[in-house]
Image (cartoon, helix red, strand yellow):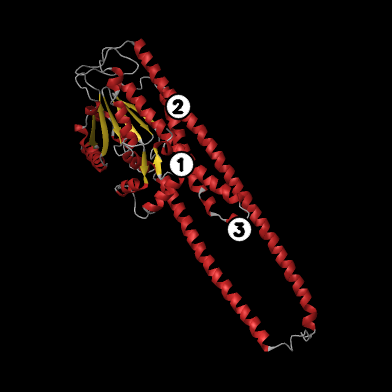
Amino acid sequence: MALLATRRCFASAIDRSIPSVRAFVVERARDDVDSVERDIAVVDVSLASRKTLPSPLNTLRSRDWALLEHAGAGASFASAPASFVTRDGVLVARTGPTTTAIGRDRAFVFDARSSVAKRTAEKIARWKAVDGGKGESLSIQDFPTFALECALTESSRYYEDKLFRLRRLAAHSIDEISEVLQLGSARAYAAPPFQKLPPIRRAVKELEEDVRQSLEALQAAATTPGLLPIPKEHGRTEISITAEEIEERDEAVTDVLSSHARRMAAVGGLIAELTSDLNSARELWELKLDGDRTRTVHMNLRATIIATSAAMASVPAALGGMNIPHGWEEAPVMLFWCISGGILCGSGAMWYMFLRRIEAAAKITDLHASELASLQFILNNMDSLENVFSGVTQNQHSVTKEALRDAMALDASRDIGTPSHDEILTTLFKVFDVDKSDRISKKEWRRS
């Protein structure tokens, strides 16, 4: 008994240590409700109050709580792999930046801070308009199946939009590299454009891993029978259906999962193409470095030959003590001072030009460092920028730099030590403002 009590105390302490999470709650629309807006609510859910958790979350175990948490909601990539977990009367589908807990007549969409979760909840709330909310006969689009399809649709769109933005960033960097390689002057030795490739390659690699995990989870879920709970009517128990109807329902769920698995496979193919483009740019960079090394070796060889020739030519003069008459002994003194003054003026001018070049190089280096820092911030906080962009463009088709700056100033997820808002906005508009209208439209930010 003492051991059992200790285990319970230890388990309750662990439950209390787990923070609460915020979720959108979408209930199956009733027949007497006309507006779908009444079916969406935001609640804070905590594992410490397990006894008072609403259904179907009260059937989850403590180890399942990690599927609901999205501590890295502001990060660009998934903090935990995609998975589909079935419990008593609930399916926990973790896909992309959201987790959807689907019950018989209710769905929870985590985390409420994400714009993807908000769009998922809004789509699920439209189920009444699709199905009619009658509940008299089981259709392919029953509430749990419809909620799963909405979650998968927004998850697939999330990966496609993220790939679209990564391809836009990669294309911008590759264009800069191509422009630098085509120059025949000393600017062709500039390395900063090539320094943007490693962070983009890392971001593409992380996205590729997230897509692969999502594809594997979808393929595994497609082979799981009875994945979704059977729906029920308001005020009644589960709908009684035959074995044939259950089989048809499982086939419909499998079709939904297979459809989105094909979308994930297509995203994986586009990622492979993007990786090939980045590898080609890297090969060009390596060829450029090989050419630079070859030119450096040739310059060193020529300098050595010239120095050796000069040394050989100075040997006879050194042996003769340099007492060779040359005619300058009888020249006026003013000629000496004129030559000396010209040398001093030329040296001073060259020194001033050298200092100016150093200052200009320092400014260019700071500018490239600022661009690189802004690029890394955009890659690491792409989901936060998506949330900000969705909030600004909720009722309009494009966003200005001032509106985006004000929205980013209110975003609490921005950490200390990141680039300034102006630097981030400059990089954002440089990459995504394709038509140079000083506004970023939805088509320029998202795939569609």
Q: Is residue 228 visible?
A: no
Residue 293 location, x and y as percent?
Answer: 65, 56
The picture quadrant where one finds residue 147 is top left
Q: Can you tell which of label 1 and label 3 is closer to the viewer?
A: 1
Q: Amino acid at mark 1?
A: Asp
Marks 1 and 2: which is nearer the front? 1
Name which residue lies at 49% across and 29% down: 266
**Front residue (pair 30, 84):** 30
Provide the secondary structure element on which disc 3 rests.
Answer: helix
Res 43 → quadrant: top left
Mark 3 vs mark 2, CA separation in Å: 49 Å
Q: Give the vertical position of 249 relative to 181 (above or below).
A: above
Q: Please indicate whether residue 365 sits to the left or right of residue 97 in the image.
A: right
- The residue that disc 1 covers is 435
Mark 1 touches mark 3? (CB < 8 Å):
no
Q: What residue did someone put label 3 on?
A: 186
Whole-percent x, y for residue 123 in the image: 32, 27
Left or right side of 246 for 135: left
Q: Could you tell me residue 54's position as x and y percent? A: 22, 30
| Secondary structure state at the residue bearing disc 2 | helix
Earlier-in-chain disc, 3 versus 2 = 3
At x 34%, y 46%, the residue is: 404
* Quarter of the picture holding the C terminus: top left
Q: Amino acid at mark 3?
A: Ala
Which label number is shown at residue 261? 2
Q: Which labelled disc corresponds to residue 224?
A: none
Tell me which residue sits at (61%, 52%) in the image: 183
Label 2: how many residues lie within 10 Å, few (<14), some (14-19) or many (20+)?
many
